[in-house]
């Protein structure tokens, strides 16, 4: 949602002293203030995360009430459930505003004050309301990440358990996709299924796209997809660079400088079969491949020594295949060019790793060949099955290998996009992995799933 925001001027409320807000959000950018919801043209009511990870809720720009949490929320790979309920008619001040994150009520605040009894908030008044930025602002601390299942209730202070519940197996907080609530005059339910901003409540409180481009993604609260991990990176090219990961952290891009850089997928695997696709929009110094958890443990992080022994890297411009500290010594895979779509299949049950390009598996590779590993990188190079089995948990990676030029890789871990461009193959539907909830440009091999929570739990 970078520089993308939605807006609507609400009508006469049922009761603007009472309301409930519930939203699921994924913070893929954490190095600046990002706003979830706001109302009013000046001295606004607003909910946001600070660059440090503090959740802030301002009433009348903090002049009439405020929450600022002591707990920090800095995970760029997970979905958060943000729940705020307000009832200023309550006699007890602390009952007038309540905040829950992932089903847990926040009670420890660095700053806390409560509105006076019977205070009329701007949220749920007849003013402009904005999702993803400050109201009536074209440059106001936009939300950068994903949002889903946004419910607003006019006239009732609901419980957090009306919108989420604890999973009996995992103990994790999970979404209720169709809450049983009464919405009131100004209530709305948007971004329920995909990127529709048409109200899914009985009302017709549809929002408008006020700026930017709103894209759809398979990544959602009930199926968290891998991205490039903002917290799991190395290199000077990423230090202090807030934009080296964009488009929901699926697009890795560096700038011309004198530093190398590496970024890794947010999900690692030790068993199962997984498929992903990378579009290399600038190959000059781009590496793609896989890494183990040990890659970032070296004190020197030298690509050409310790680093190369902890991963397998395909350099398209060479072309070269590197592992174990040296060139792997085979030309059976060739290279790749700008805008090629590189296919990768990782079989951690049989320790096979396969490379493909633009719809064809290279070196006559057959990812469904099981223990024979026909055409697998682990059969054809010094990156062998012993190496892969010793890795334990394995991650997909992208890297910037040189001191000149740039590296750019758009990852499709099954979310259905390369950057902001949707997959259009198969009559616009793309192809699903074994998980059944992913969208790829090419058909994944039988039995291979997306790198997502559903894919991990087949």
Image (tube, rainbow, N blue to C red):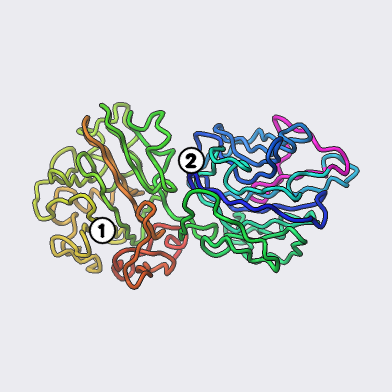
Give the residue at x 46% y 56%. 215
State the residue position of label 2: 29
The part of the image, by quadrant, that contains residue 259 is top left
Counting from the top left corner in percent of width and height, residue 324 is at 19, 41
Which of pointers 1 and 2 lies earlier in the amino acid sequence?
Answer: 2
Give the residue at x 20% y 47%. 314
Which segment did they paint magenta? 95-119
The part of the image, by quadrant, that contains residue 229 is top left
Element type at mark 1: strand
Q: Which quarter of the figure is the C terminus placed in?
A: bottom left
Residue 329, magenta (yes or no): no
State the residue position of label 1: 343
Counting from the top left corner in percent of width and height, residue 289 is at 26, 48
Q: Nearer the viewer, residue 274 or 101?
A: 101
Q: CA distance from mark 1 to mark 2?
A: 27 Å
Q: Relative to 99, does residue 439 appear above or below in the rendering? A: below
């Amino acid at each position: 949602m970078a520089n993308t925001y939605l807006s609507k001027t609400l009508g006469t409320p049922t009761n603007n002293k009472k309301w409930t807000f519930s939203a699921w959000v994924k913070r893929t950018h954490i190095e600046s203030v990002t706003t979830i919801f706001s109302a009013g043209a000046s001295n606004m009511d607003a909910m946001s995360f600070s660059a440090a990870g503090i959740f802030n809720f301002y009433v009348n720009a903090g002049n009439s009430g405020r929450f600022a949490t002591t707990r920090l929320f800095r995970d760029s790979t997970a979905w958060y459930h943000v729940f705020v309920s307000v009832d200023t008619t309550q006699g007890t001040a602390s009952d007038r505003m309540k905040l829950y994150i992932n089903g847990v009520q926040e009670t420890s605040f660095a700053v806390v004050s409560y509105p006076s009894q019977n205070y009329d908030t701007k949220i749920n008044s007849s003013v402009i309301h904005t999702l993803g930025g400050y109201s009536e602002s074209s440059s106001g601390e936009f939300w950068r990440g994903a949002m889903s299942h946004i419910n607003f209730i006019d006239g009732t202070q609901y419980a957090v358990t009306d919108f989420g519940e604890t999973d009996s197996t995992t103990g994790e907080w999970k979404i209720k996709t169709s809450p049983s609530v009464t919405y009131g005059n100004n209530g709305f339910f948007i971004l329920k299924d995909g990127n529709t901003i048409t109200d899914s409540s009985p009302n017709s409180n549809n929002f408008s796209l006020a700026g930017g481009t709103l894209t759809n993604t398979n990544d959602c609260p009930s199926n968290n997809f891998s991205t490039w991990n903002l917290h799991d990176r190395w290199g000077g090219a990423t230090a202090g660079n807030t934009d080296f990961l964009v488009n929901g952290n699926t697009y890795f891009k560096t700038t011309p400088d004198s530093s190398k850089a590496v970024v890794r997928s947010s999900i690692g695997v030790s068993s199962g079969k997984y498929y992903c696709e990378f579009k290399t929009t600038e190959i000059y110094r781009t590496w793609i491949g896989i890494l183990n958890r040990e890659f970032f443990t070296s004190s020197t992080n030298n690509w050409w020594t310790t680093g190369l022994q902890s991963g397998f890297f395909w350099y398209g411009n060479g072309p070269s295949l590197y592992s174990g500290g040296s060139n792997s010594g085979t030309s059976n895979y060739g290279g790749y060019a700008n805008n090629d779509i590189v296919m990768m299949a990782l079989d951690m049950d049989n320790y096979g790793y396969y490379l493909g390009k633009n719809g064809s598996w290279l070196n006559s590779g057959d990812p469904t060949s099981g223990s024979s590993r026909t055409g697998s990188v682990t059969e054809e190079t010094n990156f062998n099955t012993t190496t892969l089995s010793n890795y334990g948990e394995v991650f997909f990676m992208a890297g910037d290998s040189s001191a000149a030029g740039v590296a750019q890789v758009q990852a499709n871990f099954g979310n259905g996009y390369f950057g902001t461009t949707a997959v259009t193959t198969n009559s616009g539907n793309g192809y699903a992995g074994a998980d059944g909830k992913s969208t790829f440009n090419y058909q994944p091999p039988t039995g291979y799933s997306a790198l997502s929570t559903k894919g991990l739990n087949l």
